[in-house]
Image: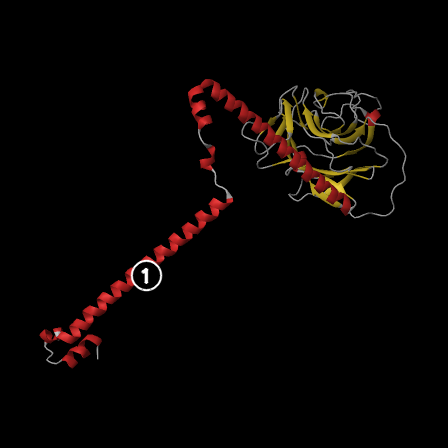
Amino acid sequence: MIAWIACWFVLTFQSSFAQIEQPQILRRFEYKHSFRTPHLAQRDGTIPFWTVTGDAIASGEQLRLAPSMRSKKGLAWNKRQFVASDHFELEIVFKVTGQGRIGADGLAIWYTAQQGTIGPVFGANDFWTGMGIMLDSFDNDGGKIIRTRSFDHHTDGSSQVLGSCHKDFRNKQFPVHLKVIYLRNVLTVLVSDGVVPTPRYELCIRAENVFLPKAGFFGVSAATGGLADDHDILDFSTFAIFTDPAQLEHAKQQLAQEEKARAEAEFERQQAEFQKEREKYKEQHPEKAKAADQDDASKYYEDAQMRELRQIYEAQAQIYKVMQTMEQKLTDISKQQVVHTSLLQGGACCSTGWSTTSNCYRWIFGS
């Protein structure tokens, strides 16, 4: 069965003129809005910066949004708003597999003004503001979808559809790649065929005059019905798109300032916890706490002058040690010289068969 992909919105659309000139495109990977294998989840089954709820199960190799069991729903939603840029690009790698000839129900990729919850629309809630890209593996009406404000399961919600295409993404030999590009109010969706390891993208949807909410949340969801498939996400990569290098530099500075503020807030929090634990320890151990308060803390610290004197003393001690070693070696050499001189003057080598001092001299020095 050929499944279909639909992209639809609940938004107020405005008119604009398409830009003729293509500006320079700069991309930056946003790790706080992404997750990837092989270390997709932590040991406790959580994904950093993401909320996983429902029947979704996260592991190191994949995020299973809905297992191949009837009436299951699961989703994962980013905890942070996407504020890096007004434009973005998503690269999602997924698998939908099942034993049946027909699968159900499908999965969805979201960008919404509010975080999603468990609901009837492919595992997510109904009534939202933003973008939903639906990968429906069970086409209920067998044709186009009608227009409604909320999602109509009997007609697959076609009243809100902005564009659609038919692609076979179930039980493929290799994972399917989906690319979503939102740039200058133009939404482009490309999908691979899953036949070869390297993705071969084909255009699925291109829609103009699309105005998405700023500072939205990314999410993924899936659901099963009377039929069931395994819905697995292997990679969810988010890239911020910049059309001006100055915007990228500004975003970097803003990110650095945010990280600095967050680090300072974390330090203050840990400092407050330390003081709290310290006061608690004093209450539980008053005698030890009193002794600690009376202890002279200055002995554990040294000022700059004391540090300089200590370093001079340590350097002089090292020099004195080296001089002692050299003196000992010179003494040993002097003793050996005295022994050799005594042997030469006293003819000690004559007992070996030599009879003169000169012969003894030649024997000692190998002449």
Is residue 30 rendered to the left or right of residue 349? Answer: right
Q: Quadrant of residue 173?
A: top right
- The residue drawn where x is 81% and y is 28% is 9
Q: Position of residue 246 (x, y in %)?
A: 77, 46
- The residue drawn where x is 11% and y is 74% is 352
* Secondary structure under the numbered disc 1 in the rendered image: helix
Say which of 45 and 329 sits in front: 329
Q: Position of residue 227 (x, y in %)?
A: 67, 22
Name the quarter where the C terminus is drawn: bottom left
Name the quarter where the N terminus is drawn: top right
Q: Residues within 10 Å of mark 1 (few under 14, many from 20)?
A: few
Is residue 85 rendered to the left or right of residue 41? Answer: right
The three-letter amino acid code for the residue at tag 1 is Met
Task: Let me know if residue 238 appears in the view.
Answer: no
363 above or below 84? below
Render colour scheme: secondary structure
Say which of 215 and 25 sits in front: 215
Say which of 266 and 285 sits in front: 285
154 above or below 323? above
Is residue 42 rendered to the left or right of residue 308? Answer: right
Task: Let me know if residue 11 appears in the view.
Answer: yes
Is residue 217 rendered to the left or right of residue 362? Answer: right
Say which of 90 and 143 sits in front: 90
Q: Quadrant of residue 318?
A: bottom left
Q: Quadrant of residue 237?
A: top right
340 above or below 75? below
- The residue drawn where x is 44% and y is 51% is 312
Q: How many marks?
A: 1
Q: Position of residue 289 (x, y in %)?
A: 45, 23
- The residue drawn where x is 47% and y is 26% is 293
**Residue that numbered label 1 is attached to:** 326
